[in-house]
Amino acid sequence: MRSTSSRDNRGIRKSGAGSVHFGGGGEVSAGRPDYAIWLMAFLLTCIGIIMVFSASGNFSYRRLADSTYFLKREVLWTLIALFVMAVAAVCDYRYYRKIAWLLLATSFVMLILVFVPKIGVEIKGARRWLHLGFLDVHTGEVAKLALVIFFAVYLSEIKEKIRQWKYFLIGVGVLALFGLVILSQPDFGMMMLLFAIVMTMMLVAGARLLHLGTLFLGLIPLAIIAIHKAPYRMHRILGFVNPDADPQGSGFQILQSQIAIVSGGLFGQGLGMSRQKRFFLPEQYTDFIFSVFVEESGFIGMIFLIAVFIYLGYRGVNIALKSEDRLGMYLAFGITFSIFFQAFVNMGVAVGLLPITGLTLPFVSFGGSSLTVTYVGIGILLNISVRNNAKRKKRAPDDPAGGGWNGRAHIPSRCGWGAGARTFS
């Protein structure tokens, strides 16, 4: 019996057997997504829902007369995030080549709109949110994902030209433009996170260490100026260096966070039994939810949470290393870096290793924008992993993921840079 076949508008012929035939005659059978990375993300989200309720229940009851206010909103955002993840997971990641500039421009407009009265929302002196009907959108989170997608596309198109000053500076110019707007909101922590993500993506893409080092050195005086122009940033630095010097002022948050973590001991105080969350620890269900988690679950819980983030990062890097094309590789690296770096910074702040930045803990902290955007990234990773796991019977010469590039790109092997590094040619 003959199997029927048809062609879609991209010249891809689908056979009745479930395999996909590209225009050049290659055949690809469907692959499975990396379920492990989704399970790690969902596990962290479940922990987050529990901890948001635990950390916010007392606060929301006293302020809003509803102890489940933040819990209900977090569950709603989780459902929305899972839906957008499913959409991103079934969308071919290569389509982002066509809309990267549109996403970048849209996110930039959103960053500007926060300064428009009645549209932008000001919270504690910062304008970082857009009020869109029944929800507020954190524009920095949207810009973070848009920049990752843009630079993944940009780096995949210029290939080894990233080693030239011209193309390197074009990327720096785009990053600097976004950084300045985000800094003016102000959101110094998000700006530094974006620079860290993009610089790491450039490093993976083969940018010269001289160029990256020059950019890093150039950021130091700019960071110093930004700190001096905003007194609260200087207070945060002083509180980080010596929190005991002003325990009721600049050092208050760090000291209260450390008290919570130390109070957890080995096995913790028990779920819902944190004392620091009761109006001692500020931002207990957002910026410092990690401190509440450790106080209630102890050192064992802290190690477990860190291990989950590390394993999620490992799965993300693994997807990048198995990617069939530069775009998939850079997207996977960028998304993984954005999640792992932000988690590292948040936990580093909580234990006193880093100055306070205001960055939330991915999947765990309360925040719909952060959760939704992060799950879009997980969906993209799943889509890339589906293509990576597809069993190829024959690689078509005109397959855009078939490695038919003019240049060569080197990515790190699992043993580091150098011998064993995978090469696309």
Image: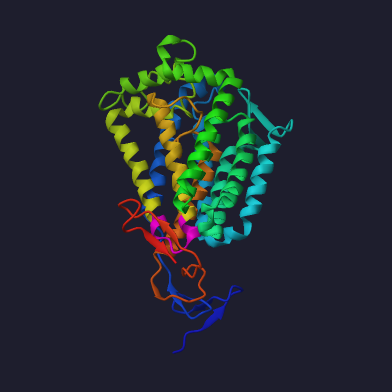
The N terminus - image quarter: bottom left
**Residue 367 falls within the magenta-colored stretch:** no
Percent from the top left, x then y, of residue 144? 55, 43
Q: Determine the image quadrant of residue 382.
A: bottom left
Left or right side of 391 for 365: right
Which residue, as the protein is rendered here, is positioned at the far bottom?
A: 1
Tell me where residue 160 appears, x and y as whole percent.
50, 58
Tell me which corner region of the image, top left, top right, bottom left or bottom right, holds residue 300: top left
Query: Magenta residues, as a range?
Result: 319-329
Q: Is residue 416 above or below residue 260?
A: below
Q: As rendered, which of 115 and 370 lies closer to the eye?
A: 115
Quadrant occupied by the C terminus: bottom left
**Front position in the image: 295 or 179:** 179
Q: Does the magenta segment cover residue 320?
A: yes
Give the farthest residue toward the left. Answer: 266
Residue 172 is drawn in which quadrant? top right
User: Whole-percent x and y of residue 367?
Assistant: 53, 35
Asked whether residue 279 appears in the rendered view, the answer is: no
Q: Which residue is drawn at 68% across and 34% down?
A: 114
Name the residue rendered at 61%, 28% in the picture. 186
Q: Which percent across, then down, holds residue 174?
A: 62, 45
